[in-house]
Every structure is written in C-alpha cells, then in structure tokens.
Amino acid sequence: MKQLHNLVYIIYDGIDNPVFEGQVVAPLLKKIANNPGITIHLISLETTPPCIKWLNNFNAAHGKNLSLHIIPRTRYTGLWNLYAPLQKVKTFLKTLDTYTVIARGPLAGYIAQKSVTESCLDLTIQVRGLLAEEYRFAHRSAVFPFSLVHALRKHQYHTLEKKVFTRACHLETVTQALKTYLCTTYALNPDVITIAYDDIPTLIEPQKKDLYRARLRTYLGIKETTYVYVYNGSAKPWQCPHQTVDLFCTEYAKNQNTYLLILTRDVADFKKILIHSELPLQTYSIHSVTHTSISEYLCAADEGLLLREHDIVNWVSRPTKFLEYLAVGLPVRHNNTIHLLIEHKKSRP
C-alpha cells in the first residue's frame, strides 16, 4: 500500500485564538479535500491544554486525515523555555517516515527548525504578522520603568524573528507589504518568500447569499430597503470600536434609513459604547455568533466597516475580517491604514 503523505502543522498561539477555526482548521480541511491521500498532524503548543473530551471530540469530528496533538508549554520568556516542547515535537517527528512541516509564526518556526529530522522533505514558516512590532504596539502606552522592560522584550522578539527568518528556506507571508517589510528589515532574499492565497475563503454563491440575506433580515427585523453597515470584530482599542460607531453616527445623520449590525464577542463593551452614542435602539443590534454563522450574518449587510490605527502592524496586515467581508462580496469602508485594502480598492472596477 502506498504510504500516505504526512503534513505536520505547528501552531504556538493555541486553539483559543479567534483565528483557529477560520485560519488554521479551515485551510487544513481544504488541503484534505484537494489531496485525499494526505494525513495532517496539527500540533498545538498550549499553556492550558484542553480537556480530553474536547480533544477527542475534535479528532472524531475531523476523521483520520486530521488529528490534533497537544504539547504543553510555558509562557515564552526566552529560548530556554522552548527546549521542553521542542524535544516533544522532535520525538513525534521521529515516528514519521517522511513528512513536510508548516509552522505558523516565528516561535513555532524556531521549534520546527530545531526539531526536524532528515526525513523532513520541506519546511515552510508562515509569517502572519510582526511579533516584535505587535508586542511594541500592544504596550506603547507604558511609562517608565515598565516602558524599558517592554523595550527589552520587543528586542528579544526581534532577535528571535531575525534568527528564524534568516535561516528559513521558505517563508510564506499574507501581503506584499509584509514581504517588502521582511526583505527590508531582515535583508532577506525575496525569492524565498511567497504570498499565501490558499487560505482565503471561497466566495459564497449569489443564490445562497440572497437566501441568507432574506432570512437574516427577516430574523433581525431589517427592511430590504435599509442600508446595513456591519462591523465584525472585537472592542480592542486598536480595532477602533469608538471610531467605528462614530462613523456610523455620521452616516445615520445623513440617512436615517441605515442600520449598524455588530458581530462581536465583546457584547458588553459595545453596549456601553452605543449607549453613549445616543443612537436610537432600533438602529443597531449586537450579536455574538459562532464562526460558522458569521458568513450568514454578513450577507444581511451592504457594506463592511474596517478601521485601524496608523501603525506598521496594521499597514502590513491581512485582517481576517477583511477576508470574511470579501467572501460575501461586501465593499469595505476603511481609513487607509492597511496597504492591502488600498490596493484592493484600486483593483475594483
């Protein structure tokens, strides 16, 4: 019998990450659909491992072609505390005859580079963002002496990225802007960097979109003639929730036949923002929905909202929310802080 091809996919940011279902599991299932002979081993490094029941249910739901393996880890404070999970990954890889590896991000990439054996046919490191810059961005308001600690921590991440990226034979980024940044910052050969497209969601068929639109508008009590703006995301400051509500307030002042649909896990935070906005209650609704239901809700809208702060972190990004808007054919209102959205707008007829 012909040996099934083994793909090992390593993630460091865990199964609780909001993008796990859409940007990790969904593309892997697509690979299985396109390559029936493949066997995918998804290795997730977790600070808090899921219960055995959840893990068994996940593996049972996805069949023998996709299995999830949990390896414990501690919070990253230096290369030294990657040693234990690295050894566990190496032990697992030794059980495979031949395999290819995809590692998501520099931390998973470092573990992969140090644990692969001679049986590894190829190693790809996916760069989905900038670890060092994202850390700096998240702690930019810190004051001394904490600002000094965060600066040292950012340097630590930058050093890790440089170590991993300059040793890589194949990097995969999500935007041209990110590729340019990596080449400039780390003096990389552009030939080793490709741009990923296979994890972009498939467009929803027009008939299905119309069905979802009619059904959701009826459920939400929205007239067909009402122009609906949708915000899909969190209430984190860098996602500009207040500016998003302010934008809708401006549009509502121009045309009162408009509606704001908010899809978020941060329901309580958005309720506070909207109460202070003094918008009439009938002009908006807030919903926390599962990943599998997002597309249906988006179909009820006419335009997606995606505002971000001005920063290199956002400039080089490819927001998951943009991909979800794209999948249902929504035009996107943005504030020119994301290079990809600017280029996308230029390419539209």
Image (spheres, rainbow, N blue to C red):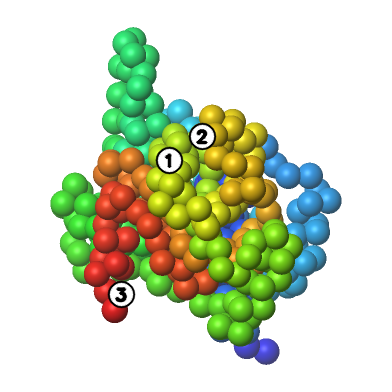
Q: Which image quarter holds the N terminus?
A: bottom right
Residue at the location (46% across, 68% down)?
A: 330
Instruction: State left or right for residue 327 relative to residue 221.
Output: left
Task: Specify the amino acid type for callout 1.
Answer: Asp
Q: Quick one: which residue is furthest to the bottom in this view?
A: 1
Q: Quick check: 305 above or below 132?
A: below
Residues at discs 1 and 3 in contact (Cβ within 8 Å): no
Residue 37: quarter of image: bottom right
Instruction: State left or right for residue 252 relative to residue 26.
Output: left
* Label 2 SS: helix
Q: Which image quarter holds the C terminus?
A: bottom left
Closest to the observer, 342 or 39 = 342
Q: CA distance from mark 1 to mark 3?
A: 26 Å
**Which tag, 1 or 3, sits closer to the chain's start?**
1
Task: Specify the amino acid type for callout 2.
Answer: Ser
Q: Quick check: 98 above or below 281?
A: below
The 10 Å Cα crowd at callout 3, few under 14, some 14 to 19, many 20 or more, is few
Numbered circle sitting on residue 262: none
* Label 3 SS: loop
Residues at discs 1 and 2 in contact (Cβ within 8 Å): yes
Numbered circle sitting on residue 348: 3
**Which tag, 2 or 3, sits closer to the chain's start?**
2
Closest to the observer, 128 or 50 = 128
Name the residue tied to disc 2.
Answer: 277
* Label 1 SS: helix
Name the residue tied to disc 1.
Answer: 246
Q: Quick check: 206 above or below 117?
A: below
Residue at the location (35% across, 54% down)?
A: 334
The 10 Å Cα crowd at callout 2, few under 14, some 14 to 19, many 20 or more, is few
The location of residue 333, given as percent across then percent down, is: 38, 57
Residue 165 visible in the displayed image: no
Task: Specify the amino acid type for callout 3.
Answer: Arg
